[in-house]
Amino acid sequence: MTELDQSLDPSVNPSAVFEHKHTIDRDCTTLPRHVLQQLQSFSPEAQDLSAIMNRVALAAKLIARRLTRAGLMEDALGFTGRTNVQGEAVKKMDIYANQVFISSFEQSGLVCRLASEEMDRPYYIPENCPLGRYTLLYDPIDGSSNLDININVGSIFAVRKQEGDDIDRTAQDLLQDGRGQIAAGYVLYGPSTVLVYSIGKGVHAFTLDPSLGEFILSHENIRVPDHGPVYSVNEGNFWQWDESIRDYTRYVHRHEGYTARYGGALVGDFHRILFQGGVFLYPGTTKQPEGKLRLLYESAPLAYLIEQAGGRASTGAQEILDVVADKLHMRTPLVIGSKDDVALVESFIENGRRQALISPKAGN
Ligand code: AHM
Ligand code: MG
């Protein structure tokens, strides 16, 4: 045996075993493995959740791959010419990404139904239904207006257990509050592709290592600060807001320590706040009194994450996770982020409500 052989042989040199251990352990902490570690179990339910997250990761990789080359491909960018159930112009990437999630769950035995922003009604995968009594709710491309200018977009998802047989395929059991979500997360397609998820045991981020084609754990147990400097809101809607929201923005304009950031994609704005603190808001407007964001596949999944990270999500008057959906594509106002910053926005809303009771014209 040469000297080199001896130094690499663990029976001769025990430290050889440990030399690369840290890097290898890090690279081995993939998403499905992390789910099993979190649950400390190999039960059928733990295996299901791990496999579901693996399929979500596959969808994310396929979408990320297309996005990185979109400018070079025919038919990747631009509008389809159609409008979706919400009356919004549909982009080609919206359709592609919607289909990617469906295809990723076909023949998986994991998810019986998928419901998304791009589909009027849930999509059923009958071959999965005898086994996979789960539903995936998702926004395939969040922040679609950023697509054609190569700025970050995202995907948002939540997993719920199906209740009942849903024989008439009306998916009534989805019309519940957000506390029934068993997993939620998002994918941010930015300089790196990052997947952030929770299964009710903290919030964890994975970064896609393109050389491995795997999401590798990059931040564990993320905690949102109780307060942060950022307020994130589309101030172009100022003229359409209730006076209480205008008062809040006047307050942050006139006090030191606040800074505005708004990227036009909820996932990106939320990601900044999750890591650095602050508040994102999309309040109701005169044109859309319930705001723009959809409860079941935008606001509720992010509310689940922010609560797991020690923050809060509110409509301004009620916790988002307590809002019971009245229809699949229901919208809610959203105030989400650091505890203290959400409370500050709520205090302006509450004050506006009280003023309106005293003098009904004051709230308008
Ligand atoms: P989308 O899912 O159709 O892209 O719409 C949701 C997006 C959010 O990502 C973002 O926060 C918001 O709409 C931006 O809306 P606006 O352009 O009105 O500020
Ligand atoms: Mg969206």
Image (tube, rainbow, N blue to C red):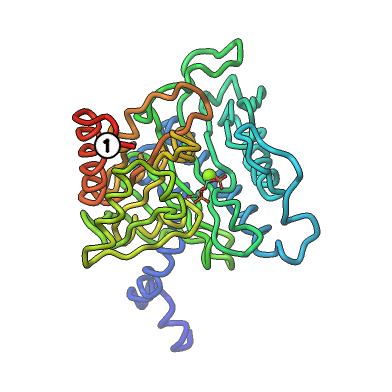
**Corner quadrant of residue 138:** top right
Q: At which x and y percent is residue 52?
A: 52, 39
Mark 1 beta carbon near ligand 1 (under 8 Å): no
Q: At which x and y percent is residue 118?
A: 63, 37
Q: Is residue 83 left or right of residue 329?
A: right
Q: Residue furthest top?
A: 168
Q: Is residue 109 left or right of residue 78?
A: left
Q: At which x and y percent is residue 26?
A: 41, 63
Identity of the residue drawn at 22% across and 45% down: 343
Which quarter shows the C terminus? top left
**Corner quadrant of residue 355:** top left
Q: Is residue 104 above or below residue 173?
A: below
Identity of the residue drawn at 54% across and 19% down: 171
| Crowding near the residue tagged with mark 1, few <14, some 14–19, many ≥20 C-alpha atoms within 10 Å | some
For badge 1, the amino acid type reads Ala
Identity of the residue drawn at 27% across and 64% down: 258
Q: Residue furthest bottom?
A: 3
Q: Which residue is nearer to you in this view: 218 or 323?
A: 323
Whether residue 318 is visible to the viewer of this picture, yes or no, is no
Q: At which x and y percent is residue 107?
A: 66, 33
Q: Is residue 177 above or below residue 232?
A: above
Q: Is residue 16 left or right of residue 192?
A: left
Whether residue 101 is visible to the viewer of this picture, yes or no, is yes
In the picture of the structure, the residue carrying the numbered disc 1 is: 362
Q: Is residue 191 left or right of residue 309?
A: right
**Corner quadrant of residue 250:** bottom left
| Label 1: which secondary element | loop
